[in-house]
Amino acid sequence: MANRLKVLIVDDSALMRQLLTQILGSDPELEVVGTAGDPFAARAKIKALNPDVLTLDIEMPRMDGLTFLEKLMRGHPMPVIMISSLTDKGADTTLRALSLGAIDYISKPKVDVSNGTVEQADEIVAKVKAVARARVRSASASAAPPAASSEKKYQFSATHKVVAIGASTGGTEALKELLSPLPADFPGIVIVQHMPEAFTRQFSERLDSLCKIRVKEAQDGDRILPGHALLAPGGHQMAVVRRGMEYGVHVYRGERVNRHLPSVDVLFSSCARSMGKNALGVLLTGMGADGAKGMLEMKQAGSFNIAQDESTSVVFGMPREAILLNAVDRVLPLGHIPDALLQRLASV
C-alpha cells in the first residue's frame, strides 16, 4: 500500500473528477490522493500532497491548463497526463501541451449507459501508471541545438533506402528532435506514432513546419520519396509495398495490432517483407512492446536497426523489448540518432 503511485486529478468538472477517481482508485497500484477544480487549488495540493502524477484538464476557470502546465514545468517539473477531447481543437491544444512538457494524454472517459462501464478505463489506468514512472523532460531539452551533423554537406547515393520509425509515449517531441536536423534531400521516411485519428494531420503539419524535409499524413498509394516523411494516419494501419523499382504505402482500415491502430509492428513487418536490407529501423520512446517483433523481422531480413536509449526515453518500454529480442544493432541517445543515420546512409 505504501508504494502505490499517488495521483492528483485536476479538472473543473465534478463529474469528471468523480469518474477519474473511480477509474484510477480501482487499481491496487494507484492512489488518488486528491482532486482540484482549478489550477490554484491544484498548486496548493501539489505542495501538500506531493503526487507522483497529475491528470490535467485544458479548459478550466481562472487559469487554463496550458498556462498552468507551462508554469508548473518551469517551477516544479513532474509527470503530467492531459485530459483531451478528440477534436481538431483538442488535437492542437494537446500537441501544444506535449511541447510544454506533458508526457501523454488520454481522451475524456465516457460511460456506456447500457451497462455502466467506462469504455477506456483499462487504457486510462495503464497510461497513468506509465506516465507516473516516466522520465520528465527538462525545459532545456527542447531547446537543445541540432546535431552537429546537420552543418555538414552529405550526398545520398542510396536513394532506394528507406528509414522506418516507430514511437509512442514521448514520441511527439522525440520525432521533432530526430527529424529537424535532417537535410532536405534525406532518403524517404515512414513513421508510426501512436495517435488517435483527429491528431495525426495536425501533428504532421507541425513537424513539416519545423523540418527541412517535407512531412505529411500518409494517404493510400503515396510514393516514398527522398526528402519526404509519411506519417501513418490515426485509425489506420500503414504498410510499405514495392511497386516495380519504387516503394509506396498501403494505408487501410485494419484491425488493431498490439491494441494499436496504427501499429509499429505492422509497418516494420511490411518493411521486412518489401525492403529487406534497403530498410533502416528506428524505435523510439514508448509504452509497451509494439514494434519489437517487427524490428526483429527487419533485422532477420537484413536491415540496420537503432533503438533510443533509456536515459533519453520518456518511457523505455518499446526500445527495451526490441533490445531484449536482439533486434537492435545500436542503442543511442536521441540526440545521436540523426548523426548515426546520416553516417549510415551518406558520404561526406
Image: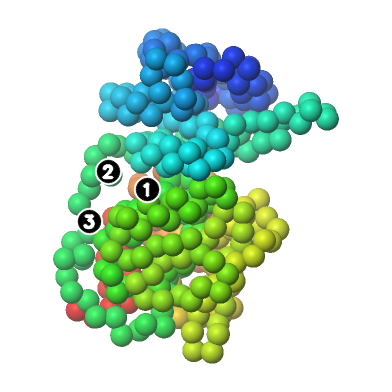
**Amino acid residing under circle 1:** Glu
- As rendered, which of 179 and 249 lies closer to the eye? 249
- Specify few, some or many for label 2: CA neighbours under 10 Å numbering under 14, 14-19, or 20 or more: few
> Image point 52% across, 31% down: which residue?
83
Relative to residue 278, is residue 274 drawn left or right? Answer: right
SS at circle 1: helix
> Image point 48% across, 60% down: which residue?
217
**Which residue in the structure is indicated by mark 3?**
146
How far across and how far down the image is residue 6, in percent?
A: 51, 21
The answer to whether marks 2 and 3 mark residues whose Cβ atoms lie closer than 8 Å is no
> Image point 61% across, 62% down: which residue?
237
The answer to whether marks 1 and 2 mark residues whose Cβ atoms lie closer than 8 Å is yes
How far across and how far down the image is residue 293, in percent?
A: 59, 63
On the rendered image, what quadrant is the N terminus found in? top right
In front of the other: label 1 or label 2? 1
How far across and how far down the image is residue 62, in percent?
A: 39, 15
**Which residue in the structure is indicated by mark 1?**
173
**Which residue in the structure is indicated by mark 2?**
141
**Amino acid residing under circle 3:** Pro
Quadrant in the rendering for residue 143: top left
- Specify few, some or many for label 3: CA neighbours under 10 Å numbering under 14, 14-19, or 20 or more: some
Which of the two labelled residues, at mark 1 and mark 3, occupies the earlier sequence position? 3
SS at circle 2: helix
